[in-house]
Structures are given as structure tokens and as C-alpha cells.
Amino acid sequence: MTFDQLCDFIENKMSMSHIYQPLLIKTLLESGGSSTVRDIALEFLSYDESQIKYYGTVAKNMPIRVLKSHGVVEKNKDLVELTAKGLSFSQRQKLKSLCDQRLNDFLESRGLKLWDYRLLADPVPDSMRYRVLKASNFRCELCGATKNERPLDVDHIIPRSKKGKTEESNLQVLCSKCNRSKGNKDDTDFRQTEFVDEVEDCHFCGGLDNDRIVSTNESVYAILDKYPVTPLHHLIIPFRHTDDFFTMTERERSDSNALIRQLKNSIKEQDDSVVSFNVGMNCGEEAGQTIMHSHIHLIPRRKGDTPNPRGGVRGVIPNKMD
């Protein structure tokens, strides 16, 4: 193909359903006319916003946090820096060599198992894959992550290793993280989870002031209660709009439990007079729920904060306290 023919193809004849055709041609041009499939894939990856967001979250949740705790890096907003300053060229090369050695040793010991959840051959035909993704509204059936937040996998509900069939009735959409966690040991159908867009008049999604958020854990977040029962009374709330405990997903409950434990430790560090906690939910108007968006109360308790604490949550019906 001549230069003029290639120009004509790019400008007039290229039919695009995604970014990949011009990106591949551009990659080949930038590498002198030829490139390996791996290098092409790496270039594609640099344009994949969902992957960039995914690995940004991975970086913040593990290596940055761990290295910061060891004093290796420091973080200021989105800028991450080594604490070792003024390194010479030879020092940088030595450190890079040491990192390469640790990487090689680790990859040699783990092999492809490190990435095996991403290397599975996908036997789902493209047309069937698209229909399953479309039916899920392009979001994870377990945690609600969208295609813009994490890579989405079409998962076999009954795993192939247990003779699960590749048919739509046995397929669901999970994000890469949920699919990794599920593995092939579970055959739960998560497709009944209802995902609702933000409700404008809901205090906890459409009407939430994000500055109130004090902590997050994947699918849930925490705020201080506007009308606290005791100081440092927190609410743990799913990002997804859902009614109560019974409509929360297993992932949301698990993330809530982890965040509750984290907040409990943080509260006790802030206030050493806290000796106990109430953890509870109101599910439905008759049980006292006033905001119909699931939320868990974490209420710190201090000695003497009420004359007779005996009975605890039984106090929701006053004459049952004892």
C-alpha cells in the first residue's frame, strides 16, 4: 500500500467500532513500521481508561500505602515521590537492578499463576458476550462496578471446571476483582441484584455532600451522623442505592464489616474513653428507618453515658430493656 492509499484508507475507508485500528497504525508508525503484538497490546493498554483507573486503585490500596508506612515513598494528593532524594545516575541504576531482580525472582516462583485469572481462554462467543454485558447494563452483578471503573468479565455461574455450559442462562457479568475473589469454588447467581441510579432526593446518594465522607472501603463509605446519639457516631452506607440490610449484596456486607472494624480502631485511638459500641440497622419504617437507603449505625459507648445500659438494642422497644 502506498502513502496516498494509506491516507485515503484512514480518512475515508476506515470503519470504526472502537479506537483500535488507528491506534494500531499509529503504534506501527511510531515504532518504524513494525512492532510485536505485546508492544501493540501495551499501547492499547495506555488508552484503556478502565484499566488505568483499576491499576490506580491497586496502587493506592496496596503498594503506595505499604511503602509509605515503611518511609520509602511520600504522597501528596496524586503525586508520589521517593523519600530518597538526590540519587546519582549510578545509584538509580543500581536500585532499578535490585527491583528487577526481585521482580524476576517473584515471577519465576509464581509463574503465570500470578495472572491466571486474566489468562483464561474466553470461550464465550462475541455476540453472546455482548448480550450478557448489555443485560447487565455493563456493570458487575456483585458490586455494581461499571465498565469505566474496572475491567468486566463474563463469568460462568456454574464453573466450566464443574461442567458448566457456555449458554446465557449460565453467564453473568463480574468485574475482574469480584471474579478473582469468586474463583471456581462458588456457583452463586448474582444476577438478581438491583442497581438503581442515584436518587436525587436521597440524603445518601443524590443529595450527599461528598465532603462529609470520612472513609471508604470499595462499595461502601462512612460519614459522621448529623444527629449523633453519642460523639463520633458513624454511619456506614453503600454507594449503591439499596433499601436495607436484606437488599445489600454479600460484597457490600463484607466491605461494611471491614470498614466498621477499621472505624472502631480509629475511634478508640481518637477517644480513649470509648469502651463499647452499638452496631445496628433499622430495616423498614416500623423498625424506625427514616432514610430509605441502607445504613449501619456504629455508636461509640462510654462508661456512664446512660444510667442503665442493660439490654442494649432491646431498648428499641422500651419495656423490653430488662
Image (cartoon, helix red, strand yellow):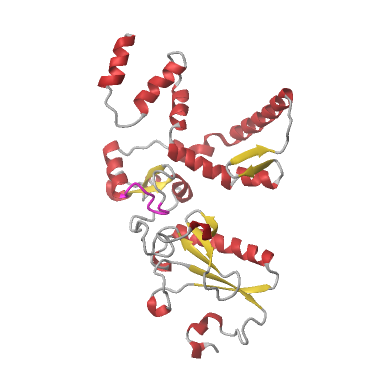
Q: Which stretch is magenta?
A: 136-144
**The N terminus lies in which quarter of the figure?**
top left
Which residue sits at x=45%, y=36%? Answer: 119
Image height of 247 relative to 146, above or below: below
Q: Is residue 312 left or right of residue 189?
A: right
Give the quarter of the image for residue 293. Answer: bottom left
- Residue 245 counted in the magenta span: no
Give the quarter of the image for residue 3. Answer: top left
x and y percentages locating residue 321 in the rendered image: 53, 87
**The C terminus lies in which quarter of the figure?**
bottom right
Residue in front for this viewpoint, 4 or 264: 4
Image height of 315 relative to 260, above or below: below
Which residue sits at x=31%, y=41%? Answer: 129
**Helix, strand or loop: magenta stretch:** loop
Which residue sits at x=39%, y=69%? Answer: 292
Which residue sits at x=28%, y=17%? Answer: 9
Q: Does the rendering let one see residue 203?
A: yes
- Residue 138 counted in the magenta span: yes
x and y percentages locating residue 122 in the rendered image: 37, 37
Q: Does the rendering let one see residue 1?
A: no
Q: Is residue 306 left or right of residue 84?
A: left
x and y percentages locating residue 150 in the rendered image: 44, 44
Image height of 151 relative to 105, above or below: below
x and y percentages locating residue 99 in the rendered image: 66, 31
